[in-house]
Image (cartoon, helix red, strand yellow):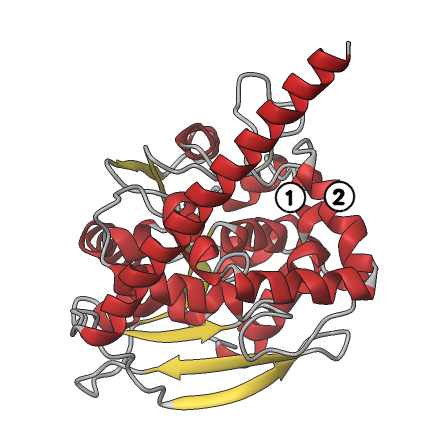
Amino acid sequence: MRLARWLAGGLLGTAAATALVAGRAYHNRMGKVRRSVAELPDDLPDLLPPDREYTVTADDGVALSVEEVDPIDGGAPELTVILVHGYTLDRRSWLYQRHELAHSTAPRVRQVLYDLRSHGRSGHSPRHACTIEQLGRDLHAVIRTAAPEGRVVLVGHSLGGMTIMALAEDNAELFADRICGVAFLNTSAGDIGRSGLPKPLLSRRNPIMPVAGVLSRWEPSARAVDRGREVCRNLVWGLTRELAFGDEAIDPALVELMYTMIRATSFEVMTDFLAVFGAHNRYSALVGLQFAKALVLGSDGDRLIQFQHSEAIAALLPDAELVQVQGSGHMTMLEQPKRVNEHLLDLLARCTGALPRR
């Protein structure tokens, strides 16, 4: 028995030492890749400066940071496009779409980009208000302020798509009256009670999520996690590349952009929104989108929200284009912007030619 314990202890120690060495080697390798980002020029377009920047006050007083970008040629816009980003990100995630839509002339569009509550430059939200229902009300507040009249197209990625569904759940009349198009990118309408659908990584069924939620409520542990993220920054950078992108050869500058957005989101904020993914179930809300043109786009390499979730959304929308992007991960609009932009511009062209029904 003593020999068995000694052997087991030796094996565990060897495994731990091996993992430590491998982890350190990976950390160093990712650090070398990250240094190359700073040393070499990248091909990322410059972030177009906004034409206007202001805040919109949500119904509970949280300040939402908003930017507007007009057509680059100065022409009159035919549509307002509101872009809603995903979990732990901010409006910089629309880098390529911001550039492409600003240069579009068929149609010309005015862009509205904002940061979700507790993300980016927006104000911090109390935990109890970190719900998809509240995000839907926030989007409604942005529409009332930034686009009080005229036709609107909503584009949502991941949590942003869920936000649009929450808006439709409570304000279906908007989609019959003014919102003539929607684009759902790498998102889900829910996983509860949907047999045959794979569960997203951020599902409440993931045992890591409840533990993370408990840790975040204990301030010393939350601070320790944030410090640990900094100490293990290269490991986190590598994990970001693995989970967010489908191609290992992705431009490191894009991974750095993604990492920068996530790193700006505290562990507390991350866990504030954890419960919303498990509770999210808005298949019935999609009925409210029956009058809108729709684009539903997913990718075959998405490790966070698999393509079957896009298929389930498109099946309930009568006028939807379903697109699967090959070789891409969760951040399709950054990884394959040309493909995404082509479909977005096609959606906008279809919306321009079709007046919303009343």
On the question of residue 352 being in view, the answer is no
**Residue 357: percent from left, percent from top:** 44, 53
- Nearer to the camera, 31 or 108: 31
Question: In this rendering, is residue 55 above or below 338?
Answer: below
Question: In this rendering, is residue 248 above or below 98?
Answer: above
Residue under label 2, please give it.
Answer: 211
- Tell me whether the residue at label 1 lies in contact with that at label 2, contact meaning CB atoms closer than 8 angstroms: no
**Residue 72: percent from left, percent from top:** 21, 83
Gap in Å between the C-alphas at discs 1 and 2?
15 Å
**Residue 279: percent from left, percent from top:** 71, 40
Residue at 77% from the left image edge and 60% from the top image edge? 221
Determine whether, in the image, residue 301 is placed left or right of residue 140.
left
Residue under label 1, please give it.
Answer: 277
The residue type indicated by label 2 comes to: Val
Residue at 75% from the left image edge and 80% from the top image edge? 61
| Number of residues whose C-alpha sits closer than 10 Å to that of mark 1, classed few (under 14), some (14–19) or many (20 or more) | many
Residue at 59% from the left image edge and 41% from the top image edge? 202
Tell me where residue 329 sits by quadrant: top left
